[in-house]
């Protein structure tokens, strides 16, 4: 499986971005059976879980992004999304997707920079 994240960029504080992550070379039934997650790694910090979406549809977010970020999935396209609104400078980092148990090799991620 290859994890292909995209959608990052430079945005001003208060702006929005929508990240996408394609789980390439996976079987649809396998994709559908796994919980998905977005992680981020800020400069000089360890990678952290940001949002989680279970196969049953329940979600979990870290406190700092609650009410601003929304994780979703399109099973037919084997793609996971992260809608990010009201972005803050502290949201800056490289964003990665994977399963909840980090099953697959990490992809290249997508850079998000929030700055005026």
Image: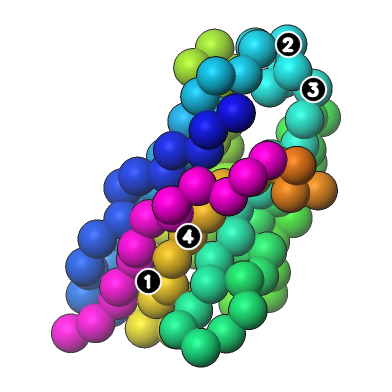
4 and 3 marks in contact (CB < 8 Å): no
Q: Is residue 113 left or right of residue 45?
A: left
Visible residue check, residue 14: no
Residues marked 3 and 2 touching at CB (< 8 Å): yes
Q: Is 97 one of the magenta-colored residues? A: no
Q: Name the residue rendered at 43%, 66% in the picture.
A: 94
Q: Distance of mark 3 from mark 2, alpha carbons?
A: 6 Å
Q: Residues within 10 Å of mark 2 (few under 14, many from 20)?
A: few
**Residue 87: x %, y % from top left:** 37, 71
Q: Which residue is mark 1?
A: 87
Q: In the rendering, which numbered label is found on residue 29?
A: 2
Secondary element at image label 2: helix
- The quadrant holding residue 112 is bottom left
Q: CA distance from mark 1 to mark 2?
A: 34 Å
Residues under numbered marks 1 and 2 in contact, where contact means CB atoms less than 8 Å apart: no
Q: Is residue 91 above or below residue 107?
A: below
51 left or right of 41 in image:
right
In this rendering, the answer to whether 115 lies above or below 113 is below
Query: Helix, strand or loop at disc 4?
Result: strand
* Badge 3 element: loop
| Precedes in sequence: disc 4 or disc 3 | 3
N-term mark: 2 or 4: 2
For mark 4, what is the residue? 95
In the image, taking residue 62 as reference, residue 93 lies left or right, namely left
Q: Quadrant of residue 23?
A: top right
Residues in magenta? Answer: 104-116
Q: Which residue is mark 3?
A: 33
Indicate the position of residue 43 as horizontal and vertical percent values: 45, 84
């Amino acid at each position: 499986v290859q994890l292909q994240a995209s959608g990052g960029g430079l945005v001003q504080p208060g702006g929005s971005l929508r990240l996408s992550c394609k789980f390439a070379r996976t079987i649809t039934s396998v994709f559908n059976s796994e919980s998905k997650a977005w992680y981020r790694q800020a400069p000089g910090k360890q990678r952290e879980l940001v949002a989680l979406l279970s196969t049953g549809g329940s979600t979990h977010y870290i406190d700092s992004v609650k009410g601003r970020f929304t994780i979703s999935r399109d099973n037919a396209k084997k793609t996971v999304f992260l809608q990010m609104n009201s972005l803050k400078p502290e949201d800056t980092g490289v964003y990665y997707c994977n399963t909840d148990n980090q099953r697959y090799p990490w992809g290249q991620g997508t850079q998000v920079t929030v700055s005026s």
